[in-house]
Amino acid sequence: MYISITKQHLDTNFSQSSCDFVAYLEKENEGKLPELQEHFFDQYHDQIAPELVIKEIDGNTAKLKKQEPKFFALTINPSQRELKHINNDPKLLKQYVREVMKDYAASFHRDNPVSVDSIKYYAKLEYERTFKGFDKEVKENQVYRAKIVKLENEIRKVERGEVSGNVRSIRKEIARLNAQIPHRINGEVVAQGVKKPGLQTHIHIVVSRKDVTNRYSLSPGSKYMESESKLNGIMVKRGFKRDQFYENAEKRFDALFKYQRNYVESYSARKAFAHDPKIYFAHLLGLPTNERSAAFKIMGASGVHIPKLNIPTNKVEAALQAIKQLKKAIDIARSSSSIGI
């Protein structure tokens, strides 16, 4: 499970309206019959019109400056393993979102506890993802595509008489390069905009910066995790407990659907990998044999190449060698695309 929270802005200025973002979330409905379209939903309603979403979010921005975000976007990204566990059931995902938003509200550090009824949010399921320019598959294919485009341009020059050359030979080289392009899906070359295979369901959520009364600011982007400050001579609580939110979101999924989460799928594991890889791999290598084996399978299915380790007799040396090899493999996967764990 991977959850992101982002401020919505254009260039250096924050969006003054949610209309562009809502229009973006409507893209999967294009060309579909009304009964097949996916609708916005909130804590209590299942079919909310996009026009109402825009009206409610844009009308809930009292006293916010142009330099302040008017709304935030949350994206909940279950892994393919998690989606398979619940049979990619949209009803279960909506149930999960409504529970997660309770945790989101409870994560605000305030004198008066924040409940889900205090926040204004609208969510929408999406079932597809497309490859982006920064994905590993696109970047690796682009090396070949660039060479092919150059050769095709050379053919045009030869045919116009601008340069001399053997068109037949050039076409043969193009065919060879085409055959060597490494990433295809059902015969189609992977490029930017091509749909990703497998279960890709995820949830977008637009959340107003202000509470439902349009009086109080609730910013999950606050730099303060959990602190107090003096306001008009009175100490007040402020901040958003992000670690608590991410961890509780995982626990919600596991409890709701009886999901057995492996260590490498957890938020604590991702955090350990980012801040202290030695702790991450020490924990990974210290897992019981069956759990460690499952962890490697999950990582492999997510795009991480697990190298074969030549284990020396010295256990300390073996652990250090394993850490170096695995960290290199995961770093490569993470830098090129999301590995989905």
Image (cartoon, rainbow, N blue to C red):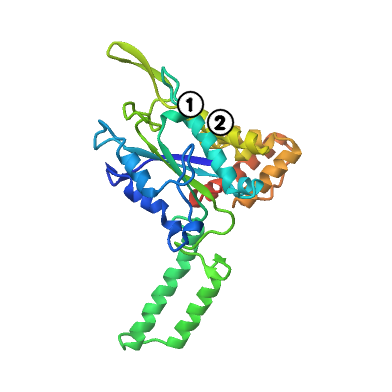
Q: Nearer the viewer, residue 151 or 64?
A: 64
Sequence-first disc among 1 and 2? 1
* Label 2: element kind: helix
* Label 1: element kind: helix
Residue 250 percent location from the top left of the image: 58, 35
Question: Is 16 placed left or right of 293 in the picture?
Answer: left
Q: Amino acid at mark 2?
A: Asn
Residue 71 percent location from the top left of the image: 35, 38
Which residue is the site of mark 2? 248
**Can residue 163 be seen in this snapshot?**
yes
Q: Tell me the residue at 37%/31% (across/down).
A: 212
Q: Splitting the image into 4 quarters, where does residue 251 fall?
A: top right
**Can residue 341 be seen in this snapshot?**
no
Indicate which disc residue 106 carries: 1
Q: Nearer the viewer, residue 196 or 288?
A: 196
Verify CB contact (< 8 Å) between mark 1 and mark 2. yes
Q: Amino acid at mark 1?
A: Ala
